[in-house]
Amino acid sequence: MLETLLLAALIAAPVGSASLFLPGRHRARAAGTWSVTRRFVLAVLGTVVLAAVVAGVLKLLGVSQHNLVVAAAGVVVASLIWLPVTRRWNARAHLCWASTVFLFVVYLTYALEWTFRSHLGPASTVGGVLLWLFEVFAALLSLAYLWEICDALGTEHWRRRVTSQVPFGDGDSKLPMVSLHVPAHNEPPDMVIDTLRALTRLDYPSYEVICIDDNTDDEQLWLPVQEWCARHGVKFKHLENWPGYKSGALNYALRNMTDPGAGVIGVVDSDYQIEPGFLRRCAPAFADSWIGFVQSPQDYRGWEDAPYYRRLYYSYKYFFSVSQPSRNEHDGAIFAGTMGLIRRVALEQLGGWDEWCITEDAELSLRLLRAGWHGLHVDRSWGKGIMPLTFEALKGQRYRWCFGGIQILRMHWRSLLPAPSSRANHLSIAQRWSYLAGGIQWYGDLLGLIFFVFLLAGAFNLATGGGELFRKLTIYLVAAVPVMVGLGLVRAVTLLRRGTGASWRDAVGAFFIWQSTSVVVARASVLGLFARKAAFLRTPKTSERAKWWEALRANWAESSLAVLGLAGIVGALTKWYQLSGPLLAALLLFPTLGYAAAPFNSWAAQRATLPAWLRERRRTENRRDRRAFAAGAATGGAVVVAGVIVAAAALLLWPSRQPVQSPNLVGPAQGATSAPASPQPTHTTAPATTPATTTTPSPTPTTVSPSPPSSPTPTTTPTSPPTATPPATPSVAGAG
């Protein structure tokens, strides 16, 4: 029966996922009894059609009548049980979610059962169980990404979405005074002054601007800003040897420089150009006495003319166009470090900004929600800053976001466990899921790297004549992975295009931006579990007109993995006449391209055409992140994790005393009894007999990941190779 259900899931999941991306008609009114009834009826009808398609395909495969009924019933039950949860989604999103969850549950059950009955031997059974545990975690990550996709593309009735048509307040009489804080560190003075000048021109009756220079060591950078502020009535303070980095500087401004009458605190990064209507639009939201923070999208300028920066721009835009609206619907939006406002009394009640976390902004929003305040994400962008102008700076930023996200997960995981709201923790189940899913999504890239190691081990084993790993992972390689990779890519790129307005070419490029930072995100996700203090990534500096070998040197880890992947592809193709050879080569191709994208993007970023003022910033960009890296226990923890991965692959390579019986889905589904495996030497490669129809999809974004950028991470799926989907749709946890 398990074989029949798995066959049904392998058919249902791709069909259900494909339906989500069919063009649909936009409905202006999606609330009310009629809309709910319509969605329910269409979901039921869609379930019937999906079950009929599954039954039709299985009938063509010769499945027995009894098993055919079981398969159709399984699809129907798997769909109907999710109807109460997905009632605000259209039928297509419901079918995508239900059929994919059905696939994961059936596949994981089958894979575990097959592991114990296939005569792998003690060592390989342990390795198989370890691999299965990785697959379970990958399934959870994939479902977190998939929920976000279905929520973004399938929601018809948005209850909390703040579009330009949603009014705030009822006039100037209730507008709070706002104190805008602009932290700066080693920034070009002209750029900081341009930001401050724009802030002094806001269309708002009562506000102040404070600039805090955070430990800039060159007085030629901060003295011109101080002089400009003195002439234009802007408060300024240069901090020297001040602890806490950005959050320490913001705490100083809050406690020592903010006007006593200010009721709202705003944070604006020193490279942002703000539109005059920013405060007029966002500050009235605080008329609701339980609003703790309001966040508008981070946006960027200077990206239109260079292909690399266009790809990078859309990789960022994903988070604020897709992830934040979905999180906001469940009151789980994050404060993203700039272009946001916070109620002052709430900030002070919580003790200000925490200085232990390098993503202090996202950490603060979690504490605000836990204390009972509410957050709002506003759809429209009101200001534009500057993206990282070198690929190495981007890697450092993604490293910080991931490291900070894991810090938050490590320190607050108890608050995120499923439980009723209480006086000490007001988080709802939906809010807990938003933050928990956002944290664990950073591990998508680590899982991708793990599965890449398994594929390399299989290619090496195949090239040396063993075929042991391939034979043991037949279901993993043949029945699950290929369509998972392909469908994962299609989902990610399609959502990027529909969510951000990118062209197909730019959407694919944005996806590979995520993939090219996967190694550094994987590293941060491990070190974040063990490091006791803030840790920034130091990256090699590249010259203005970088040579290709400089890009390889600056991204040596990714370049090395790409070379290993290429070697694995060549090794697998030495058995081109067997199914195992081309299959392993194809599965290695995608992650290899993802790692190779790192030096390519590094070279492209350095050679991209920029105006003079941005070229100078690119040249000195490495000066802005100088925190020491915390080693010791963190490095030891990373070694342990790496050892577990290598041990799992080695255990699966251990020769079995008995021949391993490859799984056969079609025979049992047809009512035949699986024949015992005939004796054969363990060194002989057993060709896979699973038919090509037994392939499955993989849900996407993210790293997964960004994951655009809590984030800034896109998705690794159960038993899929590492880069099947974006890293953690990158969670954006602050731009500073």
Image: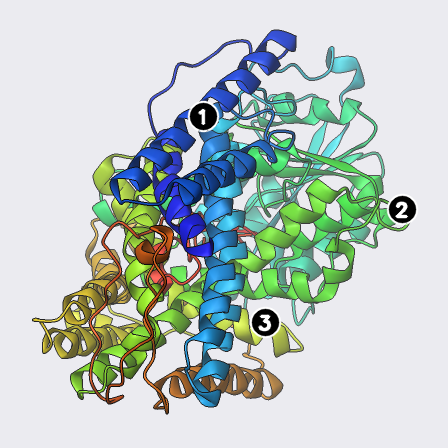
Q: Is residue 80 left or right of residue 117?
A: right
Name which quarter of the figure residue 689 lies in: bottom left
Q: How many residues crowd mark 1 within 10 Å: few (<14), some (14–19), many (20+)? A: some
**What residue is shown with label 2?**
422
The amino acid marked with disc number 2 is Ser
Left or right, residue 156 beside residue 353: left
Disc 2 crowd rating (10 Å Cα; few below 14, some 14-19, many 20+) is: few
Mark 2 element type: loop
Return the mark for residue 48.
Answer: 1
Q: Give the mark nearest the N terminus, 1 or 3.
A: 1
Residue 221 seen in the figure = no
Q: Which mark is residue 528?
A: 3
Looking at the rendered structure, the kind of residue marked 1 is Val
Q: Secondary structure at mark 1?
A: helix
Q: CA distance from mark 1 to mark 3?
A: 46 Å
Residue 88 appears anywhere in the view? yes
Residue sitting at 45 percent across and 25 percent down? Answer: 48
On screen, residue 100 versus residue 59, left or right, reads right
**Would you place residue 624 above or below residue 260 in this image?**
below
On-image quarter of the C terminus: bottom right
